[in-house]
Amino acid sequence: MRQAGSTSNVASVVVIGVDSRSMGQIRETLGAEATLPAQATKYEDALAVVRKLRPDVVIAGFDQDYEEAIRLAPQLLAESGRVQLVALSAHADSDRIRAAMRAGYREFVVLPDDAELLRQAVHEAIYQEGGDEDHGEVVTIWGSKGGAGATFLAVNLAAELSPVHRVCVVDLDFSMGDVAAFLDINPAQTMSDLLRNLHKIDERMLAGHVVVHPSKIHALVQPTDLEQREEIKGDTVMRILTTVARSYQYCLVDCGSRLDEPALTAATVADRILLVSSPDVPGIKNTWRRLQLLEKLGIEKSRIHVILNRWDKRDAPFSLADVEQNLSRKVDASVAFDRAATRAVNEGKLLRDVDKKCAAARDIESLVGLVTDGEISVEKRAAGPIGWFSRFSGG
Ligand SMILES: Nc1ncnc2c1ncn2[C@@H]1O[C@H](COP(=O)(O)OP(=O)(O)OP(=O)(O)O)[C@@H](O)[C@H]1O
Ligand SMILES: [Mg+2]
C-alpha cells in the first residue's frame, strides 16, 4: 500500500535491452526522480546486475528481444521480490501487453505517450510498503453468452463477501454495464470519469470514483446514460485492476459476455475466473469455446471455475453429467433457477434482501468458499440442496 513519505527519495532503476535513443527518452522522462545507469544492460547480464544493485525498478525493452524480456521477468522477481518491472516498447501490441502482465510486468509503457505512467510507476516503487502479498484477489465473472447471469452473480457474490471483506465490483462491460442498475444507484462518478483522469490514478483517486452501497459493497460502475463508448485498451484495464487490487481484498470484475480486450485482459490477470453458463445448448457450447480460448491464452485450469446458473434439474433438458461430458470437465458449482432473482433485479435489490433463504441465495452463499479458498465450503457441500456438489473437483 502506498504511504506518504519523503519526496526526496529517488528510485534506483536498471534498464535492460534498449537502444541509446530509448535510453535518452527514459532519462528525459524520469529526470531527477531516478538514478539511472549510463547505458542499458544486455539481457544476458540482467540477472547479475539486478542481484548486485537491488534496484527499485527494472525497465525492460520489448523491441530488441521480446521473448527474452518475457523469460527474464519471473527470474528477476525471484531475485528481488520487491522490484517493479516495467515493459518498454515502441508499440502497444495487445498480445504482448497481455504476455507482459502474465509474466509479472507491472506496467507496459510506450514513450513518449506514457511518460506520466512511467514516472508514476517509478514513484510508486519507492512509496510501496509491500509487494504482491498486499494485493487483493481479482475474480472475473464472465458470462458464456448474453444474459447468462454475470452481473447478477458479481453483485450478489459481492454482497456475501462485503460483511467481512473489503470488496469492490468493477463493471468492465463497457458496452452496457448493468452493475449500477442492479444496485439501484445513480452514481455521481463513474468509470468514464476515472478514464479521463487515468494518468493520475492511485488508491485515493479510485476512492473518489467508487460508489458505496448500503451493503458496504463498493462499485466502480459504468455511466447510466449511453455515451459514446471509447475503445478500452488492455493496459488501461490493467492499471485500473491493479489499483483496485491494492485497495480491496476482493475485486469482482463483471466482464459481461464479450470477448473484447477488457475481458481478455481481466481474465489474464485474474486469480480466479468464474465462467457463468446458462443451462441450454448455446450456453454450454459457448462455455466450451471460452474454455478452449482460455487454454490457448495459457491460463491455468486451476484458475477457472465453471458455474451453471439458473439450474433447475427437474426442468433441465439434459443432466449434469451430460453438461460435464460436453465440457470435458467438471462443473464447479450451480446456482438454482429462482424467481426471486428476477424480482431482485427488477427492484434493484440484492437477492438476500428479497429472500435470503431462497435456493439461489443459498447457492450464492456457497460460492463464497470458491472465491476465498478455491472450493465450496465443506459444510455447504454437505448441507447444500444439490447433491452433485459432492463431486466438486476442488478447483
Ligand atoms: N439464478 C437465476 N434464476 C433466475 N433468473 C436469473 C438467475 N440469474 C440471473 N437471472 C436473470 O437473468 C437475467 C440476466 O442476468 P444478468 O443481467 O446478470 O446476465 P448478464 O450475464 O450480466 O447479461 P448481459 O450479457 O446483459 O450483461 C436477469 O434479469 C436476472 O434476473
Ligand atoms: Mg451484465
Image (cartoon, rainbow, N blue to C red):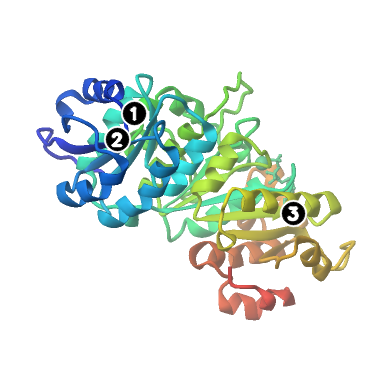
How crowded pointer 1 is (Cα within 10 Å; few <14, some 14-19, many 20+) is rated as: many
User: Secondary structure beneath disc 1?
Assistant: helix
3 or 1: tag closer to the N-terminus: 1
User: Residue at point 57% right, 78% down?
Assistant: 378
Q: Which residue is under mark 1? A: 117
Tags 1 and 2 touching, CB below 8 Å: yes
Q: Amino acid at mark 2?
A: Ala
Q: Amino acid at mark 1?
A: Leu
Residue 8 image offset from top left, x and y in percent: 9, 33
Q: Amino acid at mark 3?
A: Trp
How crowded pointer 3 is (Cα within 10 Å; few <14, some 14-19, many 20+) is rated as: many
Q: CA distance from mark 3 to mark 1?
A: 38 Å
Determine whether 159 is above or below 59 in the image: below
Tags 3 and 2 touching, CB below 8 Å: no
Q: Is residue 157 visible?
A: yes
Determine whether 145 is above or below 93 in the image: below
User: Secondary structure beneath disc 3?
Assistant: helix
